[in-house]
Image: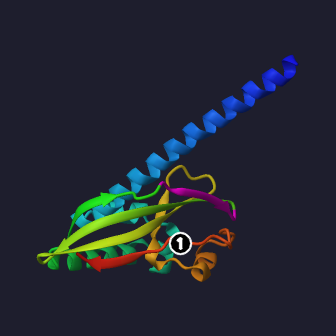
Amino acid sequence: MTWLCSLLVALAFVASAEAVQSGQDASRVQEDVRTLIRALYNGDVDTVVRYTHPTVIAMQGGTSAARKVVQDVVVKLKDGGMRVDSLTFPKPPEFLEGGGRRFAVVPTLSIISANGQQIESLNFQLGILDPGATDWTFVEGSRVTKQNVQVLFPGFPATYEFPPFYRKRL
C-alpha cells in the first residue's frame, strides 16, 4: 500500500510539473508573438527576421533577401499609417509535436488602425521549436495550410485542424 501512495504522489508531482511547464511555455510563446508583432509595426526588421523560421528565410532567398522583404512590408505599413491598437490572445496556445519538432499554435486577436479605419484580425502564429533549439521561431498563420505545412515542416500532425482566421472592418 505504501508503494501505491508513493506512486500517486509521484504522478501528482509529474502532472503538476508538466502543468507549470506548459503554462511557462504558453506565456513564453505569447510574449514572443507580442514581440514579433510589435517589431513588425515598429519597423524593427532585425527582430522580425530573428523570430522568422529559417525555412521561411531560406524560401525568400536567405537572410539578406528576407530583410528586404520585411523592410518592404514595413514601408507599406508605415505608408498606410497602420498601427496595432490592441493585441490579445483569445485562446491559449496549443502545443503539438511531429517530425522531431515542437509546435505552438498561438491564436491572436488584433485591432489594427489604418487611415482612420479599424480592422479586426483573428489569426494565429505557428511557433516552431526545432530540435536542439532554445528559441521559438514563427510563421504567420494565415499563410499555413494543411498542404504546405507538410512541405515546410514534414511530420507536422496531419490530422490537425488549424484555427479559423478572418479580417473585418469595424
Image side of residue 125 versus residue 42, left or right: right
Q: How many marks?
A: 1
Image side of residue 122 versus residue 6, left or right: left
Per the rendered image, the range of residues in magenta is: 92-99
Quadrant housing the C terminus: bottom left
Q: Relative to the observer, which residue lies in front, 3 or 143?
A: 3
Please name the residue shown 33% across and 72% down the image: 121
The amino acid at mark 1 is Thr
Check disc 1 and report the residue beneath it. 55
Q: Is residue 80 above or below residue 35?
A: below
Q: Relative to the observer, which residue lies in front, 81 or 108?
A: 108
The residue sitting at the right extreme is 1
The residue sitting at the left extreme is 116
Please name the residue shown 50% across and 68% down the image: 54
The residue sitting at the top extreme is 2
Q: Position of residue 24 (x, y in %)?
A: 50, 42
